[in-house]
Amino acid sequence: MTAGATTSEQEASNAAPNLTGAELTGGLNGWSTSASAAMGVEEMVLLDGPLGIVSKAMDERDTSLIMPSGTALGATWDPELVSDVGQVIGQQGVERGVSAILGPNLNMPRSPLTGRGFEMFSEDPLLTGILGAAWVDGVQSQGVGSCTKHVVANDTETERRRMNSRVEPATLRETYLRPFETAVRSANPWMLMMAYNRVNGTHCSQNAELIGVLKDEWKYDGVVVSDWYGVDDTVAAANAGLDLEMPGPATHFGARFGEAVAAGDVAQPRLSDAVERLTRLADRTGRRSGGTPPAPSRLRSQHEQRAILNKAASRSFVLLKNKDDVLPLDLSGIRTLAVVGPNASKPCFQGGTFATVRPEGDVVSPLEAIRAAVGPGIEVLYEPGAAPSSALSLTDLGSTAPDGTPGVLLEVLPAGEAEDVLYSEVRQASAFVWFGPVPGLGAGVPGRARITANFTFPNATRWTLGAGGTGVSSLRVDGTEVLEVPPPAPDDVMGVVARAETQEIALEMPQGKVEVVVEMAFQPGRVQAITAVATPEEVTDPLAAAVDLAARADAVVVVIGDQQGSSRESADRTTAALDTASDRLVAAVAEVATETVVVVNASRAVLLPWADNVKAVLMAWFPGQEFGPALAAVLAGKEAPSGRLPVSFPWRDEDIPGWGTGLDAQLTLNYAAGEPMGYRHFEGSGRQSRYSFGYGLGYTTFELVDAVTPTSPTRQDPANGVDGIIVRATVSNTGDSQGRDVLQAYAKAPGEADFRLVGFKAVDIAPGETAEAQIALDPLGFRRWDSSNAVWAIPSGEWEIRVARNASDVGILCRIAL
């Protein structure tokens, strides 16, 4: 007993729950966790970054290397290379003082329509899990944590904050949770992020069943964090097992977590568990007072980092067609090379998300790189052939601030009519986002933001101008208001910000100097945004100029694809097709040029209605900022494309899994309508994909000679699967150049209708040589979820193992008894 304390006081003290560290459970601001002097924990910076480290302040001047997208990395089928990319982004995190990077995205694109599919690795849970684990391992080897996301069934962006994913238990376990399980088992990411959506009726951050799988079944020891603004209920989320609410200032956790424990609504051990996990994260990232910062496994020079990104880009390219071996280009027979397509001069590296990255250092466009690669003896001519499919930033159109400086003038003013400028700066962007404090104004204070841009037109022209933001926005041209945009619905503010949503108006712009002003009045809120965009009307027909050029050239390279707004967070697509102008461009060029090569710069499965009419099709995804040099090397034959499709390509929209289904009146998406998805959909439905999962050509040819399973399992355990099964496959390089092939093993349980990927192995083979690949089959691929008893089981009997070069290849069949 403490000296001087009465018995009743001591009993009351003993009964009081320990609330130490509760402050750790709520974020500090938009990017940092809270510190705790009592626990010796410092603030930890968490920044978005599947494709590169994002600026804390969404400032276009804060740059980092743009990595290949998830789908591009998926196309490499190369865990070692993906780990190297993870190390690069981890090193960039170290250099920027980041404790954890919000990535990778281990959701799966059930459909090419999902707006955020470019972040995802593949449609297969094994490939996604293995590559995701490699990315996590690479990042964390640098002493920076991975916040792997989004648990779970977060593969549609439509109404993502409110929608409900209805998923059968077996499908949930075997398909959608599986990549996360592989990542936890193999790499143990230091954080896992819960998704916005509901799963079977309960929001993921408040879903005790889901979080129980992570913590109890998988024995996960890291931090379970909400997606930003993804918590609705303190008690429900705390009791479910959530450890951290982001962003800050905390609305439901932090002090309120402690209050819920003190009130008896949440048990004290639940708080202790959260605090223990957060202090463990501080230890792992070197953010514990008196602790030692972790030592990176290896620090690479800028040249080495760019070399890794270049290799990842070229290895991600998938050659879908190469009629008459038109690739690599025979430069000796070319005097004039036509390069057409808007993506040749302005490639797309990423979709539209909060995680938009501004590139670090020089970025060489495909057009510039091709010119450098072919040398001075070949004339390379360019025409865009199509207008951009998305509106452009005002700075992309040559805007100047009122003082003549290139860019726009961004100002922050008080609420009302006062013209007292609280913040003023010339910026090289025309869309701005602030989480928390607004420059010159602070946080939670009403005010106004204003963008002023001047243009000088040699002749009268017609433009479409757009404005939007988180409050009431107005658009003025030469002092006259021409558009007022109402504020977004309160429950969709984050979606509007993510989509950079605007309303537009077409206007005649007079000859001479014109001033464009977008102003937004905002009320107190946790996030603020203002956006101004424009689209000039085409004066001449870009298609005609491109077709004329193609008809005169010895060979044509067409580079088409997405714009940054084509695939984006908080919005899904309505079709897998590219924009109409791009398809029309390829079709028109193919009519006049027999030697046409098409490069598709889109990180999703797309429709290719013109593929039969061109010589070659190269899928380039969003391959990172080394796109240009990597593409030029592949076209010239200095490197060979060796990627394999991580997603199935449909012939038409109607062939997409779940086509025609969507959210019902209760915002529920019934997964059963589209299951199984991916290559299993095409196999089970009897429909043919245009290009199969796992498919890809190269600059040589391969023949699968033999495949055997000489091993027996060393262990069978329902929870951990079947260990020790190895398939030995023999493959020959029947062409005349070095090449890399990816051998794939698919398994079918007794009584099942379709095969599932259970292993893969890449082999490099010299021309005329034969090699043996040992494919270690995934132990967890032999489990099936018994929904009746809620346990894992291993189906007994004769399993079929098909070794093939893609999902629709008949391959070689082996059998093994379990």
Image: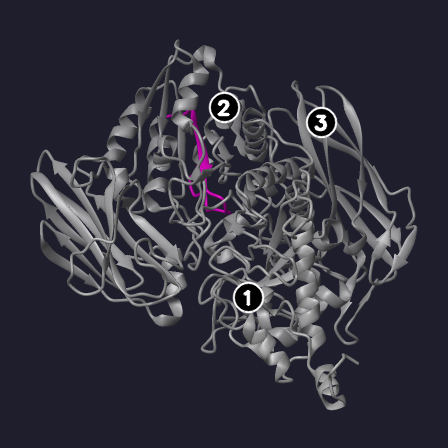
Crowding near the residue tagged with mark 3, few <14, some 14–19, many ≥20 C-alpha atoms within 10 Å: some
> Is 315 placed left or right of 510 in the picture?
right
> Is 747 placed left or right of 20 in the picture?
right
Label 2 sits on what residue type? Leu
Q: Describe the element under mark 2 as helix, strand or loop.
A: helix
Q: Which mark is residue 764?
A: 3
Crowding near the residue tagged with mark 2, few <14, some 14–19, many ≥20 C-alpha atoms within 10 Å: many
Crowding near the residue tagged with mark 1, few <14, some 14–19, many ≥20 C-alpha atoms within 10 Å: many
In the rendered view, would you say 720 is above or below 365? below
Quarter of the picture containing the C terminus is bottom right
Residue annotated with mark 2: 635
Q: Position of residue 640 (x, y in %)?
A: 59, 25
Quarter of the picture containing the N terminus is bottom right
Residue annotated with mark 1: 26
- Can residue 225 be seen in this snapshot? yes
Going from the N terminus, do you reach mark 3 or mark 2 first? Answer: 2
Residue at 68% over, 75% down:
18
> Is 685 placed left or right of 519 in the picture?
right
Q: Which residues are magenta?
A: 593-610
